[in-house]
Amino acid sequence: MIESKRDYSKEIADICKQHNVKYMGLRGSSYDQENIGTEDPEIYFLVEFFPMEPKEYGRCYFGLEKELENLFGREVILCDLTGITLPELLGPLTKRKTDIYKA
């Protein structure tokens, strides 16, 4: 179980920098940095990556997922917004979000 009322911003920023992340947000009931998914079995993150080669993308995506799961001690679900351009898809995904990292 992760602690509530803890600020994860430094750890998140370090992890994002290591994995070429341009933007990260929390979606839906994952709340904010101080209460990240304390009630939920999983945490939903919205991410955008800087442009990179496919092999590097795979390393960054799965490395990011693993490090976040290690940090929070629960399942992490990543939704990569990088290639989503249709408003019909993007709107519902970003409707309830909290920005937690911007490069």
Image (tube, rainbow, N blue to C red):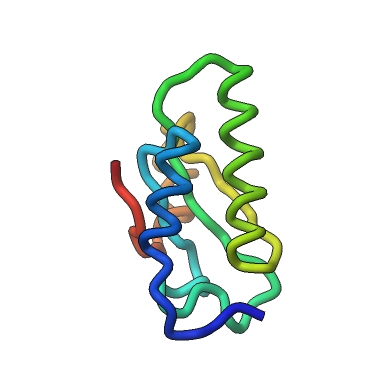
Q: Quadrant of the N terminus?
A: bottom right
Tally the marks.
Answer: 0
Q: In the figure, is residue 87 to the left or right of 69? A: left
Q: Residue at x 56, y 46 (%)?
A: 79
**Could you say where residue 22 lies in the image, as x and y percent from the top left?**
36, 38
* Quadrant in the picture for residue 12: bottom left
Q: Which residue is drawn at 51% across and 71% down?
A: 30
**Could you say where residue 60 lies in the image, as x and y percent from the top left?**
57, 33
Q: Which residue is drawn at 65% across and 59% down?
A: 70
Q: Residue at x 44, y 33 (%)?
A: 20
Q: In the figure, is residue 84 to the left or right of 100? A: right
Q: Nearer the viewer, residue 9 or 76?
A: 9
Q: Which of 62 and 41 is in front in this view?
A: 62
Q: In which quarter of the image is the C terminus?
A: top left
Is residue 84 shown above or below 10?
above
Outermost top residue: 53
Is residue 3 shown above or below 46?
below
* Quadrant in the picture for residue 54: top right
**Could you say where residue 77 lies in the image, as x and y percent from the top left?**
64, 54
Q: Nearer the viewer, residue 18 or 33?
A: 18
Is residue 58 shown above or below 69?
above
**Could you say where residue 38 lies in the image, as x and y percent from the top left?**
58, 81
